[in-house]
């Protein structure tokens, strides 16, 4: 179950059907660790693929540009029809063999990510009128070296968009790191991005996520147990996940999750968050 942000998710995924980008050409998703940023990226990727969009998904670690150009995009070529790959070969950007399998990148012209993206977008438009390219970059970091590469990457995407490529790009990370990215010299277009700040789920959203997950799993939960999970998870998505999981596993053979199960989950979940999240945030500080 993915809790919250239903309105934003509906607005963004509508682009995959209409190509009406509006404010959704570039998106910055910020929030605490465990707030649901990566899950949101996964939801967007699924929706894009369902609408025949191409998806480029990676994280902001070193070597991003090379991975996308030398591994991810060639892999995407393999998902296209032979006829589409044939037309791409005619552009002189990629070299394919007789079975239309990727062999190598032609070097007559210096390889540029923007050329790759424009070529893919144009060819995709011929077969899928509302098709485009979704690019998601997770784990944005404010380290100088990584920011420099991210800045170059964003500049290439910006050029591709300015040349008419149908691209949505989404960056996810801690807000201070996203702010540092936006302030780079070549990321001016990101300053006009739509910003989503992932905070806590509302009590009603939390209750729904817990109850619905348990229902889908084929069990029930006592009202008092559900209210206790709701109270101590405080709408923090990762803690909600742990609370439900530990309560579920405490007496897994029972048809109903009890108040005792919820009490048992309480201490374990809080301890896990302290060790896995809070202590790491403290070390960063």
Image: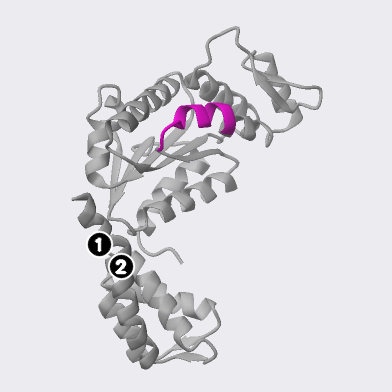
Query: In the image as oriented, which residue stretches furthest toward the left?
Result: 285
Q: Is 162 rendered above or below residue 261? A: above
Alpha-carbon neighbours of circle 1 within 10 Å: few (<14), some, or many (≥20)?
some
The image quadrant that residue 270 belongs to is bottom left
Residue 234: percent from left, percent from top? 26, 72
Residue 22: percent from left, percent from top? 36, 36
Tag count in the figure?
2
| Residue occupying the point 49% across, 25% down | 165
Residue 273, numbered label? 2
Is residue 89 shown left or right of residue 233? right
Residue 61, numbered label? none
| Residue occupying the point 34% across, 32% down | 146
Q: Quick one: SS at disc 2? A: helix
Q: Is 77 rendered above or below residue 105? A: below
- Is any atom of residue 199 visible in this view? no
Residue 65 lies in the magenta-colored region: yes
| Residue occupying the point 39% across, 70% down | 241
Residue 231 lies in the magenta-colored region: no
Q: Earlier in the sequence, mark 2 or mark 1?
A: 2
Q: Which coloring applies here?
A: one colour
What residue would you read off at disc 1? Answer: 278
Residue 200: percent from left, percent from top? 27, 63
Q: Quick one: SS at disc 1? A: helix
Q: Is 55 rendered above or below residue 216? A: above
Q: Which residues are magenta?
A: 61-71
């Amino acid at each position: 179950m993915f809790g919250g942000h239903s309105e934003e998710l509906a607005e963004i995924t509508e682009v995959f059907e209409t190509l009406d980008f509006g404010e959704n050409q570039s998106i910055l998703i910020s929030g605490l660790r465990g707030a649901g940023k990566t899950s949101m990226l996964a939801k967007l990727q699924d929706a894009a693929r369902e609408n025949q969009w191409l998806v480029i998904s990676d994280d902001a670690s070193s070597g991003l540009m090379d991975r996308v150009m030398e591994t991810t995009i060639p892999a995407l070529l393999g998902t296209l029809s032979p006829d589409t790959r044939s037309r791409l070969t005619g552009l002189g950007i990629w070299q394919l063999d007789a079975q239309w399998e990727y062999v190598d990148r032609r070097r007559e012209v210096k390889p540029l990510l923007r050329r790759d993206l424009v070529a893919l977008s144009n060819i995709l438009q011929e077969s899928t009128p509302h098709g485009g390219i979704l690019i998601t970059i997770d784990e944005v970091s404010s380290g100088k070296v990584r920011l420099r590469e991210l800045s170059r990457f964003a500049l290439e995407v910006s050029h591709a968009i300015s040349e008419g490529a149908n691209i949505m790009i989404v960056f996810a990370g801690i807000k201070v790191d996203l702010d540092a990215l936006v302030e780079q010299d070549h990321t001016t277009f990101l300053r006009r991005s739509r910003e989503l700040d992932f905070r806590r789920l509302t009590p009603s959203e939390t209750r729904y996520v817990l109850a619905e997950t348990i229902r889908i799993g084929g069990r029930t939960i006592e009202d008092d147990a559900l209210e206790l999970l709701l109270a101590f998870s405080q709408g923090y998505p990762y803690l909600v996940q742990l609370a439900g999981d530990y309560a579920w596993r405490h007496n897994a053979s029972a048809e109903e999750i009890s108040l005792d199960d919820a009490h048992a989950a309480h201490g374990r979940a809080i301890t896990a968050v302290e060790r896995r999240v809070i202590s790491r945030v403290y070390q960063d500080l």
